[in-house]
Image: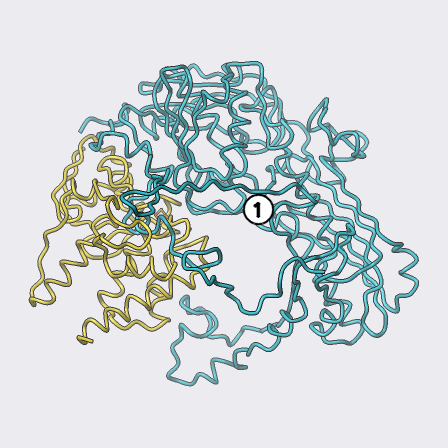
């Protein structure tokens, strides 16, 4: 079958999709967007978390056909997504636009510092993960970033219990989670400081 | 006598900017937060095939026949390989003992053992083809523990062993045995006012690293192969891969791809050889990605163990002696079992001073899934048992369990059971003091928290199945010991090569990080995967 949907702000179409394929498979294997990770394919680990019409979902549990006509944001589009949110909030309007698939595919830290994120356009939550040391092997990171970004979108000052609740569907085997909590607190604090103009 | 100073703060830091000991950001952090970092499962190549492994459904059986004809006839299937298709005389590999068949030959020794591999143009096609392979198994009696492994009529898991441990084991179904005797435990036992013994059972555990086994093999024009893989040990992999492919090592070019965690579970070979065989057979790049279910079959686990311990102590709380017997279940293939036996025995006393010890550790060959490296590597199983013993001893002496441990805690200079002096700081008593001083949550938290309480902060947390009313809290303390680096006096060294260049009068870092040179980066950027050939046309 053929599936049409919007990925990171850009209309896309996938051909020859078998009905049994998941959104995750189509993103990773047909669209060249392997940022969303496959760690369980059964909705347990959250590594495949993407936004589907704004709602965080496990892409491994969404049949590709269910996405027809809808909007998906993946980790590859997160920086642009956050930037547009910030701009539209500043101008008091909400809009969608986004990264071209081509741009997302060519996402690369080339010419920037791969260590500090300097020179790279990152979402605040991405920068906070780097700064707080919340990334180890990084396999859980894309899913956690999408989930944490959504939390900060609806709750600018999350309590620790809020953070734990929002991230309770995401497993990490490396960090022990403390640094991930640090990163979300850091992103919230920076957002707060910006918001209040300090 | 120490060779290193006593640490004065948690983070030793560095006085030199960029110097050794300084906390630093990850070199790959940006790539990992943008989704750009290429993990082994992200590899993609135009024209690539998907590999799949057919695994045994039984723990111990003779293979009477294998029929692959139906699988081979399926549209979209490019190759089906079994033992008979292996290209050279060498058909086994292994970390230390080469006892593991690339594909099962005549017999399977554990549930999940690879029997055949398939390459097809869609992963689902490969899975369906594998399901069409017919194998006729004749079940054999299973060996699951020490009694069945060493029974007089026990079948041998491996016939005709000729490895270097066979001369030192009491039975061919024992991989390795490591006794350690120091002082005289029987004599020392006479000084004891109390003696405690117990048997402890420790279950199997899995590393469950987040990124399942995966990689891609690309056939080279020179008859060799390029392998992109997530592994812990490229060099050790290469020594095991090249001989069974019948290739010289320089024709197997290994590139480390992004590794999604490991924790010991990637020390052994998983899909490496199978992907190379399929790539060499089909002349096409072959990608293999285990799913979570297969991943539990795809790597070794932590050894389950049965441990028997005896300790004695005097009235004033000093340990007199320790005797123990540790039986580790190594499963069907050796993997790292000999080293795990070494660790279990040499660390079996724990972080305590005991002069007189009588220790024996063994690992068995059984029909259980193979066990090998996992964080702690033998030290954890022993810790579980000796710490239970410490609590029992303290109770028998009517002493506080932490105080009892502190009285016997090792420190810098203590002799380990092997006679090796501990030449670095070992602040065991101080650790225990600090842990004990930590505040406990309030009693009856759900009452203390009051009406307004956030239920997420109470026992039961998010799942909200209890607020703690039915929860009984027990408090226990435990401490363990683990070597750093390899164990048992292994010649453990590391080397580093540093190259400096001056560009325009400025020092510069000349190297390109290897993780950027992925097959994915080298491949065309547009992807079009075919539909599975059995699927209905769009
Ligand atoms: S891969 Fe989707 S939840 Fe684990
Ligand atoms: S960083 Fe490895 S799983 Fe989270």
**Location of residue B290 in the rendering, given as x and y in whole percent from the top left corner:** 42, 36
Q: Which chain is yellow?
A: A
For label 1, the SS is loop
Q: Which residue is mark 1?
A: B374
Query: Picture coordinates of residue B79 (x, y %)?
Result: 40, 18
> How many numbered badges does the structure rendering display?
1
Q: Residue furthest front?
A: B505
In the image, taking residue A70 as reference, residue B508 lies left or right, namely right
Q: Is residue A65 above or below residue B307?
A: above
Q: Give the colour chain B carries in the figure.
A: cyan
Does B473 sit left or right of B128 as displayed?
right
Residue B537 left/right relative to A117: left
Q: Nearer the viewer, residue B388 or A123?
A: A123
* Point 38% across, 65% down: residue: A181
Q: In terms of image quadrants, where is residue B355?
A: bottom right
**In which quadrant is the N terminus of chain B drawn?**
bottom right
Q: Residue B74 lies in what quarter of the image?
A: top left
Q: Is mark 1 within 8 Å of ligand 2?
A: no
Judge whether B499 appears above or below B48 on screen. below
Nearer the observer, B93 or A15:
B93
Q: Position of residue B244 (x, y in %)?
A: 53, 20
Q: Position of residue B523 (x, y in %)?
A: 26, 30
Residue drawn at (36%, 57%) of the image? A169
Residue at point 65%, 41% (across, down): B491
Against B35, residue B434 (above or below) is below
Q: Quadrant of the C terminus of chain B?
A: top left
């Amino acid at each position: 079958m053929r599936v049409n949907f919007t990925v990171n702000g850009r209309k896309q179409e996938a051909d020859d999709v078998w009905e049994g394929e998941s959104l995750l498979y189509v993103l990773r294997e047909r669209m060249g967007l392997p940022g969303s990770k496959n760690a369980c394919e059964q909705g347990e680990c959250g590594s495949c978390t993407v936004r589907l019409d704004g709602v965080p979902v496990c892409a491994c549990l969404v049949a590709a056909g269910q996405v027809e006509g809808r909007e998906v944001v993946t980790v590859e589009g997160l920086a642009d997504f956050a930037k547009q949110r910030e701009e539209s909030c500043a101008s008091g309007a909400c809009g969608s636009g986004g990264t071209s698939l081509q741009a997302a595919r060519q996402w690369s830290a080339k010419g920037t510092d791969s260590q500090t994120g300097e020179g790279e356009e990152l979402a605040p939550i991405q920068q906070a993960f780097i700064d707080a040391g919340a990334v180890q092997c990084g396999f859980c990171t894309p899913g956690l970033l999408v989930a944490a970004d959504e939390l900060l979108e609806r709750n600018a000052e999350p309590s620790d219990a809020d953070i734990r609740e929002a991230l309770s569907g995401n497993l990490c085997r490396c960090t022990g989670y403390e640094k991930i909590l640090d990163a979300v607190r850091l992103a919230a604090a920076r957002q707060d400081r910006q918001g209040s103009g300090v | 006598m120490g060779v290193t100073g006593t640490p004065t703060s948690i983070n030793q830091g560095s006085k030199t900017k960029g110097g050794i000991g300084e906390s630093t950001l990850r070199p790959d952090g940006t790539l990992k937060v943008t989704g750009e970092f290429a993990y082994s499962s992200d590899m993609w190549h135009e024209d690539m095939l998907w590999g799949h492994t057919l695994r045994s459904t039984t723990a111990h059986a003779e293979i009477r026949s294998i029929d692959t004809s139906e699988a081979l006839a399926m549209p979209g299937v490019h190759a089906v390989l079994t033992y008979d298709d292996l290209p050279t005389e060498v058909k086994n590999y292994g970390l230390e003992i080469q006892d593991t068949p690339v594909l099962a030959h005549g017999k399977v020794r554990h549930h999940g053992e690879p029997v055949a591999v398939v390459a097809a143009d869609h992963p689902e096609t490969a899975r369906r083809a594998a399901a069409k392979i017919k194998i006729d198994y004749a079940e054999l009696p299973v060996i699951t523990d020490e009694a069945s492994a060493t029974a007089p009529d026990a079948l041998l898991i491996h016939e005709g062993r000729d490895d270097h441990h066979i001369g030192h084991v009491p039975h061919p179904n024992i991989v390795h045995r490591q006794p350690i005797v120091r002082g005289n435990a029987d004599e020392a036992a006479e000084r004891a006012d109390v003696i405690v013994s117990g048997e402890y059972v420790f279950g199997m555990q899995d590393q469950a690293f987040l990124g399942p086994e995966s990689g891609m093999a690309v056939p080279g024009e020179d008859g060799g192969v390029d392998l992109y893989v997530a592994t812990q040990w490229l060099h050790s992999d290469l020594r095991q891969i090249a001989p069974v492919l019948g290739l010289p090592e320089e024709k197997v070019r290994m590139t480390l791809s992004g590794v999604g965690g490991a924790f010991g579970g990637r020390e052994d070979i998983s899909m490496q050889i199978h992907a190379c065989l399929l790539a060499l057979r089909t002349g096409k790049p072959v990608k293999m990605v285990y799913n979570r279910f297969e991943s539990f079959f795809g790597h070794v686990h932590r050894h389950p163990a049965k441990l028997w311990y005896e300790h004695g102590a005097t009235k004033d709380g000093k340990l007199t002696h320790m005797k123990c017997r540790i039986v580790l279940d190594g499963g069907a293939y050796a993997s790292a079992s000999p080293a795990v036996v070494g660790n279990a025995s040499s660390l079996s006393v724990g972080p305590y001073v005991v002069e007189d010890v009588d220790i024996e550790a063994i690992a068995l060959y059984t029909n259980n899934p193979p066990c090998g490296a996992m964080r702690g590597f033998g030290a954890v199983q022993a810790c579980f048992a000796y710490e239970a013993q410490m609590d029992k001893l303290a109770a028998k002496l009517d002493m506080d369990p932490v105080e009892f441990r502190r009285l016997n805690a090792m420190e810098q200079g203590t002799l380990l059971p092997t006679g090796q002096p501990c030449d670095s700081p070992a602040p065991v008593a101080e650790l225990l003091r600090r842990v004990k001083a930590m505040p406990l949550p309030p009693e009856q938290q759900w009452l203390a928290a009051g009406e307004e309480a956030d239920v997420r902060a109470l026992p039961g947390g998010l799942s909200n199945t209890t607020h703690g009313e039915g929860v009984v809290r027990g408090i226990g303390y435990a401490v363990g010991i683990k070597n750093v680096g390899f164990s048992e006096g292994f010649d453990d060294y590391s080397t580093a090569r540093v190259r400096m260049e001056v560009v325009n009068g400025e020092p510069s870092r000349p190297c390109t990080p290897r993780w950027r040179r992925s097959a994915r980066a080298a491949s065309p950027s547009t992807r079009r995967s075919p539909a599975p050939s059995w699927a209905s046309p769009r």
